Image (tube, rainbow, N blue to C red):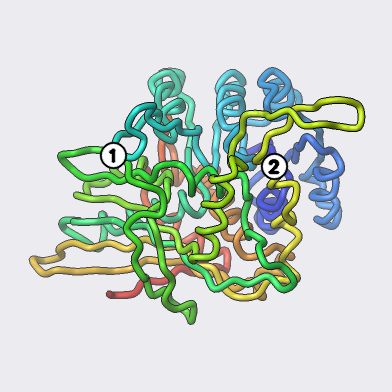
């Protein structure tokens, strides 16, 4: 297996550090718009000859396809933000390469009824091409991070091994992370966080299908394991709600994120001021007017999440809560994966949130390399057997857990 990794930021850098400890691939080309960042990611690996650095514009499909061809890469792993999903997705197909991402093509709210009906859903652009990928015998694994990703694997595992009938699957994400010296410092890309949190959340119900609600709706307090404790969680737009029902039979699917009230109010303020917008606005510059995206300005004003590890402490938890019936009796479980920032920094030099995101596509790559996962078309993590993934995740030294509720 020869891999082109596009994106050498926090998650991309963590991917290289995790992959460097595994023997399943022949080469990994680390490409980024900023060549210094790609070189730094490769340089941190102690001279592993399997890794090389390149510069590429993720929005330039032909350049990405040429890079795949030049390095004879048979897999493209997308570690960029969701704006670049479609050009990279198309570049992989044009080059005949397997494709993996951790976030899917962007949504667009319904023009007239944004908090009741779906407009363009997350992943719709990718699934619209599924028949072509399948016809050409190519595989695209979409939403293969931690959430979406591992959370979807948990849903598949619950359906296959823990339940006879599933009433509800609810992804629940929470943490007790804190960053010393900052009043507001998101532990993940603020660009992606704004996209997820301020778009209309999607809920799935059998018989009704997908529909939307108000942002931050249906607050609930969820008790997270391993000392994290109770965190208020709210509805947020996320890929699992669009992926799980395609392969897992459940009457209801939700995603709730433990943001905390202060974080929610900050996001609401950004929205009120129009600072969540992506369309450029014109502002004065030293050489005349320039066009800038308000959301890009917000991102530029905040610290890079990849640099926060030394200041961060606490744990992050990603998990899937499932309620249903087993052997005629009601059952309720929470399948989860916890990462302690102190451990991930000491072991890999990566902060907990980006490391937890990064390990899952590497596990998926290894399963594809060995043939344990295979297929054609545009497939979510639920489309594959869960047990090999969970066993390999444990073998990587990062075990998962299950709690009966």
Above-or-below relation of 231 to 83: below
Residue 246 visible in rendering: no
Which element carries disc 1, helix, strand or loop? strand
Which element carries disc 2, helix, strand or loop? loop
Left or right of residue 235, residue 37 in this image = right
Query: What residue would you read off at disc 2?
Result: 26
Mark 2 crowdedness (10 Å alpha carbons): few <14, some 14-19, many ≥20: few
Q: Where does the image place residue 135, in percent across and percent down from the top left?
A: 41, 18
Mark 1 crowdedness (10 Å alpha carbons): few <14, some 14-19, many ≥20: some
Above-or-below relation of 376 to 275: above
Above-or-below relation of 235 to 317: above
Q: Residue at x 26, y 60 (%)?
A: 161
Mark sitting earlier along the chain (2/1): 2
* Image-quadrant location for residue 391: bottom left
The mark lying in front, picked from 2 and 1, is 1
Residue 149 visible in rendering: yes
Left or right of residue 272, residue 232 in this image = left
Determine the residue located farthest toward the right in the rendered image.
287
Number of numbered tags placed on the structure image: 2
Above-or-below relation of 95 to 1: above
Quadrant in which the C terminus appears: bottom left
Query: What residue would you read off at disc 1?
Result: 211
Q: Residue at x 48, y 81 (%)?
A: 227
Closer to the camera in the image, 48 or 187:
187
- C-alpha gap between disc 2 and disc 1: 44 Å
Q: Where does the image place residue 109, in percent across and percent down from the top left?
A: 41, 32
Q: Where does the image place residue 137, in percent across and percent down from the top left?
A: 45, 23
* Image-quadrant location for residue 342: bottom right
Q: Residue at x 41, y 40 (%)?
A: 380
Q: Where does the image place residue 340, in percent across and percent down from the top left?
A: 59, 73
């Amino acid at each position: 297996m020869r891999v082109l990794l596009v994106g050498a930021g926090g998650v991309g850098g963590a991917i290289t550090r995790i992959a460097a400890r595994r023997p399943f691939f022949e080469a990994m080309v680390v490409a980024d718009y900023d060549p210094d960042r790609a070189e730094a990611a490769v340089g941190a690996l102690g001279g592993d000859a399997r890794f090389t650095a390149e510069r590429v514009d993720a929005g330039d499909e032909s350049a990405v396809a040429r890079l795949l061809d030049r390095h004879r890469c048979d897999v493209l792993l997308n570690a960029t933000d969701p704006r670049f999903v479609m050009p990279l997705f198309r570049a992989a197909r044009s080059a005949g390469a397997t494709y993996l991402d951790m976030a899917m093509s962007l949504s667009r709210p319904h023009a007239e009824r944004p908090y009741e009906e779906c407009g363009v859903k997350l992943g719709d652009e990718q699934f619209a091409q599924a028949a072509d990928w399948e016809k050409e015998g190519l595989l695209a694994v979409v939403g293969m991070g931690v959430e979406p990703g591992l959370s979807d694997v948990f849903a598949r595992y619950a359906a296959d091994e823990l339940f006879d009938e599933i009433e509800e699957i609810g992804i629940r994400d929470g943490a007790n992370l804190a960053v010393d010296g900052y009043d507001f410092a998101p532990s993940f890309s603020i660009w992606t966080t704004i996209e997820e949190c301020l778009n209309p959340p999607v809920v799935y119900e059998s018989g009704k299908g997908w529909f939307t609600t108000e942002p931050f709706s249906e607050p609930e307090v969820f008790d997270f394991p391993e000392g994290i404790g109770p965190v208020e969680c709210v509805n947020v737009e996320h890929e699992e709600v669009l992926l799980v029902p395609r392969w897992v039979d459940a009457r209801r699917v939700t995603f709730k994120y433990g943001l905390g009230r202060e974080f929610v109010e900050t996001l609401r303020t950004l929205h009120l001021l129009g600072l969540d917008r992506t369309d450029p606005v014109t502002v004065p510059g030293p050489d005349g007017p320039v066009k800038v995206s308000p959301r890009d300005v917000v991102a530029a004003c905040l610290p890079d999440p990849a640099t926060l590890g030394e200041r961060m402490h606490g744990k992050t938890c990603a998990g899937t809560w499932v309620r249903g019936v087993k052997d005629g009796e009601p059952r309720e479980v929470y399948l989860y994966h916890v990462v302690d920032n102190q451990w991930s920094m000491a072991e890999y030099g990566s902060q907990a949130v980006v490391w937890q995101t990064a390990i899952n596509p590497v596990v998926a790559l290894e399963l594809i390399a060995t043939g344990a996962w295979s297929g054609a078309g545009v497939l979510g993590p639920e489309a594959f057997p869960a047990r090999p993934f969970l066993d390999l995740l444990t073998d990587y030294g990062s075990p998962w857990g299950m709690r009966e509720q």
